[in-house]
């Protein structure tokens, strides 16, 4: 089953495809296709390419430098970028902080920060999770004590994605211990070059370096870096997490993964026939495709609601759960298709022996291991099920 798009939407899809064909280099697309780690220069170059067309901040309104796209256009853009193996847009400044500042920031914060996100002057990362405060984010202990016109911050953040590249970090910090845990949290912007900040790498299971620990020791931050109202940062956190969890649905990425899986199943053979003709494996692919199509339609409805301010945390949690389960299932099917070749062998040792290790093998292992994180970050799927249950049954 396919979605019906209007002639205007089909024309927009053709425009995006043409732009990607003309501006996405084969070298960069190959890196993404093969699951290679992208450096900062790769990502910044692609961001600059998109910004030259005013397509970088897809969710921002025109008055702040965005393209002013509707939900369907954003969906089409994301899907076509994934299908073309374009690098993902790093979301922390563009998809998270930008919308937060547009809704909650002062005019000065918007004027100072938003243009620097768009032109690449600042690279932002997210300081939410802590040891002991991941999905239970309200238990965070990083403290910000006011001293005159500054906050003095002490504490630790963990799983800080791409923090090794970042110039700035937006953080949830505890500014009060009175009342409920959620009532004493504030949202603060911090320059990572401030004395007292240390970034330490965390090596991932597939061998990559994507996340970090960030330590704060008597870090002095101006009170003017507070976004919104002191002790009301939980409202901002929920707003941001709704955007994040909706994005984690990953429809475009899963669509691309499904296409790659089908191509792989046509290429590999079992008992002399293409794997895609095996009834059991074909049924598994069909089930994944049906789930993905249902998610695509649901995601579009939610995006339309979100653009009107009607999206709920519960719906975002549902999308997060379903989207991550689908993507992990697709990774698992690719692993099953490759069989022993999906093991993370050193590819250089197997060069030329495509019967043992086809080119897809290296990317499959890295993708399978790395994407185990999808059901954990942004609030684990177990916590998201609790959110849904509380909404339905009350608490």
Image (cartoon, rainbow, N blue to C red):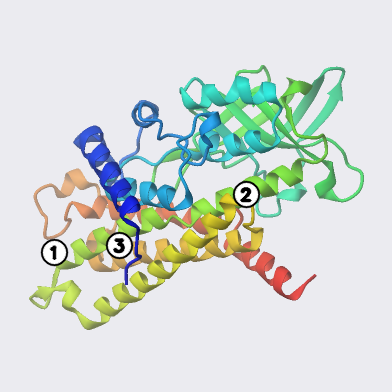
Instruction: Determine whether 273 is above or below 319 in the image.
Output: below
Residue 365 placement (x, y as % from top left)? 32, 54
Q: Are marks 1 and 2 in contact (CB under 8 Å)?
A: no
Find disc 3 in the rendering and name its residue: 258
Q: Nearer the viewer, mark 1 or mark 2?
A: 2
Label 2: state its secondary structure: helix
Q: Nearer the viewer, mark 3 or mark 1?
A: 3
Q: CA distance from mark 1 to mark 2?
A: 40 Å
Tell which residue pokes out farthest to the right in this image: 178
Which residue is located at x 29 percent, y 48 percent?
11
Which residue is located at x 19 percent, y 62 percent?
263
Which residue is located at x 34 percent, y 38 percent?
37
Q: Residues within 10 Å of mark 3 (few under 14, many from 20)?
A: many
Instruction: Determine whether 355 is above or below 239 in the image.
Output: below
Find disc 2 in the rendering and name its residue: 241
Find disc 1 in the rendering and name its residue: 267
Looking at the image, residue 128 sits to the left or right of residue 82; the answer is right
Is residue 181 something that shows in the picture? Answer: yes
Looking at the image, residue 137 sits to the left or right of residue 325; the answer is right
Tell me the quarter of the picture where residue 191 sits.
Answer: top right
- The image's mark for residue 275 is none
Q: CA distance from mark 2 to mark 3?
A: 27 Å
Instruction: Determine whether 78 is above or below 145 in the image.
Output: below
Which residue is located at x 76 percent, y 49 percent?
139
Quadrant containing the C terminus is bottom right
Is residue 192 something that shows in the picture? Answer: no
Q: Earlier in the sequence, mark 1 or mark 2?
A: 2
Q: Earlier in the sequence, mark 2 or mark 3?
A: 2
Residue 190 placement (x, y as % from top left)? 66, 25
- Name the foreground residue: 78 vs 354: 78
Residue 252 placement (x, y as % from top left)? 37, 54
- Name the foreground residue: 297 vs 85: 297
């Amino acid at each position: 089953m396919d979605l019906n798009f209007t002639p205007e939407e089909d024309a927009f899809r053709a425009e995006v495809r043409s732009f990607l064909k003309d501006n996405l280099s084969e070298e960069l697309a190959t890196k993404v296709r093969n699951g290679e780690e992208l450096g900062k220069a790769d990502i910044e170059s692609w961001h600059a390419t998109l910004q030259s067309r005013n397509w970088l901040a897809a969710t921002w309104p025109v008055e702040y430098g965005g393209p002013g796209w509707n939900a369907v256009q954003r969906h089409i853009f994301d899907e076509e970028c994934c299908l073309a193996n374009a690098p993902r847009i790093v979301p922390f400044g563009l998809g998270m902080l930008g919308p937060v500042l547009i809704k909650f920031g002062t005019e000065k914060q918007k004027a100072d920060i938003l243009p620097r996100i768009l032109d690449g002057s600042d690279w932002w990362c997210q300081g939410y999770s802590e040891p002991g405060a991941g999905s239970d984010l309200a238990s965070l202990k990083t403290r910000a004590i006011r001293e005159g016109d500054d906050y003095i911050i002490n504490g630790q953040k963990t799983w800080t994605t791409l923090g090794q590249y970042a110039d700035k970090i937006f953080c949830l910090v505890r500014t009060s211990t009175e009342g409920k845990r959620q009532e004493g949290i504030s949202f603060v912007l911090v320059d990572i070059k401030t004395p007292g900040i240390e970034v330490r790498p965390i090596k991932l299971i597939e061998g990559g370096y994507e996340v970090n620990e960030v330590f704060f020791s008597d870090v002095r931050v101006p009170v003017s870096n507070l976004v919104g109202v002191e002790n009301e940062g939980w409202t901002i956190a929920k707003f941001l997490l709704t955007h994040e969890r909706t994005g984690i649905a990953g429809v475009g990425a899963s669509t691309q993964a499904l296409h790659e899986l089908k191509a792989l199943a046509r290429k590999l053979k079992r008992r002399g026939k293409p794997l895609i003709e095996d009834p059991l494996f074909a049924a598994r692919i069909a089930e994944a495709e049906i789930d993905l199509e249902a998610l695509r339609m649901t995601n579009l409805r939610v995006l339309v609601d979100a653009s009107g301010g009607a999206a709920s945390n519960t719906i975002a949690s549902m999308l997060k759960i379903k989207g991550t389960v689908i993507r992990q299932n697709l990774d698992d099917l690719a692993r099953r298709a490759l069989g022993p070749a999906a093991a993370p062998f050193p590819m250089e040792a197997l060069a030329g022996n495509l019967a043992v290790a086809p080119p897809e093998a290296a990317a499959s292992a890295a993708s399978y291991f790395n994407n185990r994180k999808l059901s954990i970050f942004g609030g684990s799927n177990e916590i998201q099920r609790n959110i849904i249950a509380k909404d339905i049954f009350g608490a």
